[in-house]
Image: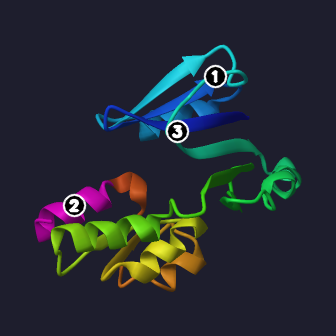
Amino acid sequence: AGAIIYTLEENKLVAYYESSSGDYFDEFIAERENEYKTFKKVDSLFGLKLENVVHFSVICRSKRVKREYDLIKNICGINSFYSIGTNGYGLIEANELEATKSAALEYIEKKYGFDTVVAFGNDGNDVSMMKTASLPVCPSNSTDEVKKFASVILKENKTGSVAEFIKEYRF
């Protein structure tokens, strides 16, 4: 189990987390770290003085997810979501009400005048973005809820299918 606080620092996403307590948490971080997102291990998340916090995630055993989610779901000013995976772990996410994936897509579309905006999603927290995108795309291992809104369903996300799609259509 573990928690991650995401901030924006010098136009880059920086995620702070405490030392992990399991292989799944380590795998979660390893799959997501890239040139645009850095993970920094800290002794404790409590007491950190962070600015520009944009997102908060908690990963824990699925039997605890609903209980933990119930503690935060009614906090004024945040949007929260939880899902339970088939691997025995669950994910809780929280962000400011206006900081949604859908709002980000609308902003980008207007700012740059794009005719087509492609969105890739796989879980319930992506549904609003999938509804907003002109071309919603998801991998085959997405939730059924996300698949309902996808115009294109790719192979599983661990096969490189998203990269293949982008390369093929030159987005």
Residue sitting farthest toward the top: 43
164 vs 161, left or right, is: left
Provide residue 2's location: percent of width, then percent of height: 70, 33
Q: CA distance from mark 3 to mark 2?
A: 28 Å
Provide residue 46's location: percent of width, then percent of height: 73, 24
Q: Is residue 117 above or below residue 104?
A: below
The magenta region covers: 160-171
Single out the mark in the foreground, 3 or 2: 3
Disc 1 target residue: 48
Q: Which mark is residue 93?
A: none
Secondary structure state at the residue bearing disc 2: helix
Q: Which mark is residue 164?
A: 2
Residue sitting farthest toward the left: 170
Q: From the image, give the main secondary structure of the stretch colored magenta.
A: helix
Provide residue 61's location: percent of width, then percent of height: 79, 44
Single out the mark in the foreground, 2 or 1: 1
Q: CA distance from mark 1 to mark 3?
A: 12 Å
* Residue 119 in view: no
Point out the tag, 3 or 2, that comes first from the N-terminus.
3
Q: Is residue 156 above or below residue 55?
A: below
CB of mark 1 within 8 Å of CB of mark 3?
A: no
Secondary structure state at the residue bearing disc 1: loop
Magenta segment: does it hold 80?
no
Query: What residue lies at 63% left-to-right and 30% top-to-bottom?
Result: 23
Disc 3 target residue: 6
Tally of numbered discs: 3
Quadrant placement of the N terminus: top right
Point out the tag, 1 or 3, that comes first from the N-terminus.
3
Single out the mark in the foreground, 1 or 3: 1
